[in-house]
Amino acid sequence: MIDVREVTKTYRKGGAEIRAADGLSLRAGPGDLIVIHGPSGSGKSTLLLMIGGMLPPDAGAVLSGADDIYGWSAARRNRYRKHTVGFMFQRFFLMPYLTVFDNIRIPLALQRRPGDHTEAIREVADRLRIADRLAHRPAELSVGEQQRVALARALVGDKALILLDEPTGNLDVENIEIIAECLAEEGRRGRTIVVATHDRQLLDIATASLRIERGRIAPADGQSRPRPDS
């Protein structure tokens, strides 16, 4: 269970203050697929970074179970990111000198998990329609293919919490449907998924959604939705 309680975050740019998060709260557990939507600059990415243990809030708490992750040591929070959180960034951060296969394998290598992970990598690549690209390097892929590689890297393995920042931003309708189906399946498998997106199509697979505007939750859009398999 992830429990975000009234977090705030203020950035300073020049002489101005930008309140990226202003009392944001969110709860999500196994099987939940939470879609966060809203305009650019509204605070969606900031919230994901705080949940992922990469950006401490100025106030409030981010709880994993009963523990505030920002009360942990840096080493423990690093283990949380390494073993619990799969994260997809908007900018992908693929390693240009590695093949698609090895880019997807990075989280498993960081965990130092023994054994041959070929089957797991091929399985997620096949679901995202990039299995024929595993021997290629990122420069040989389209932007949409690179995006699906970044998503595969976030999903590979058995991390309990998946955080995705604009996973469908460069994709056509057909590939958005592929992503949506894949995420719905991950939710049915019991993972906790939080997605920040401009794409309202993903609202159809959400178990709950919330809209953020200027760092605050818009009160009319936090309603629960049916689970995709109900």
Image (spheres, rainbow, N blue to C red):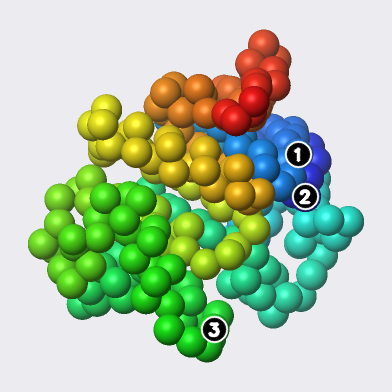
Q: Residue at x 38, y 61 (%)?
A: 123
Q: Which residue is mark 1?
A: 27
Q: Amino acid at mark 2?
A: Met
| 128 sits left or right of 25 in the view | left
In the rendered image of this protein, does residue 217 appear above or below residue 142?
Answer: above
Q: Nearer the viewer, residue 213 or 170?
A: 170
Circle 3 crowding by C-alpha within 10 Å: few under 14, some 14–19, many from 20: few
Q: Is residue 3 visible?
A: yes
Tell me residue 28's x, y (percent). 72, 41
In the rendered image of this protein, does residue 130 appear above or below residue 6?
Answer: below
- Quadrant of the rendered structure where residue 19 is? top right
Q: Amino acid at mark 3?
A: Arg
| 93 sits left or right of 88 in the view | left
Q: Nearer the viewer, residue 125 or 25?
A: 125
Q: Which residue is mark 3?
A: 113
Tell me residue 82's x, y (percent). 59, 72
Q: Residue at x 48, y 58 (%)?
A: 155
Tell me residue 213's x, y (percent). 57, 23
Callout 3: SS: loop
Callout 1: SS: strand
Q: Residue at x 66, y 49 (%)?
A: 190
Looking at the image, is mark 2 or mark 3 nearer the viewer? 3
Q: Is residue 11 visible?
A: no
Q: Amino acid at mark 1?
A: Arg
Q: Say whether marks 2 and 3 touch (CB < 8 Å).
A: no
Q: Say whether marks 2 and 1 touch (CB < 8 Å).
A: yes
User: Upstream in the sequence, badge 2 or badge 1?
Assistant: 2
Residue 1's label in the rendered image is 2
Tell me residue 131's x, y (percent). 25, 60
